[in-house]
Image (cartoon, rainbow, N blue to C red):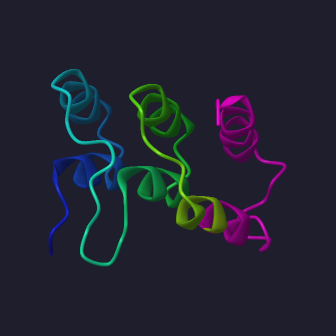
Amino acid sequence: MDETLIFYAIKNSNFTLFDFLIEKDCDVNYKTKNGSTPLRCAIINQVPYFVKKLVEKGATLEEKELKTYLYLNKYPKFDLRNNKQKEIERIFFNMKC
């Protein structure tokens, strides 16, 4: 597995570790061998705080991340009406492309 600590922080909702790594300028655009990124991981785990911080630090929203977001919103398990999804949606729409 080639995931870095930022993936661990996101998957485990470890805000302290996440903030520490962001402050230390970790690579927010790191890609694993299968093409996963911290931003995609944050989207899948539905943590708006992580999504926002990654975007602020320059995480690139690539087609794969957008497709992941759109895919998750097609299914009832990932209800667009929930607050986390609304917040993630606002972050995406406020991004400068």
Q: Image point 15% across, 69% down: which residue?
A: 2
The answer to whether residue 28 is above or below residue 91 is: below
Q: Nearer the viewer, residue 56 or 50?
A: 56
Number of on-image labels: 0
Residue occupying the far front of the picture: 97
* Residue 9: image location, x then y, percent: 27, 46
Q: Image point 54% across, 49% down: which residue?
A: 61
* Residue 8: image location, x then y, percent: 23, 54
Q: Is residue 16 left or right of residue 63?
A: left
Q: Is residue 37 left or right of residue 65?
A: left
* Residue 12: image location, x then y, percent: 31, 51
* Residue 21: image location, x then y, percent: 19, 32
Q: Image point 15% across, 25% down: which residue?
A: 24
Q: Is residue 10 left or right of residue 61?
A: left
Is residue 76 in the magenta section?
yes
Locate the N terminus by quadrant.
bottom left
Q: Which residues are magenta?
A: 68-97
Q: Is residue 12 left or right of residue 1?
A: right
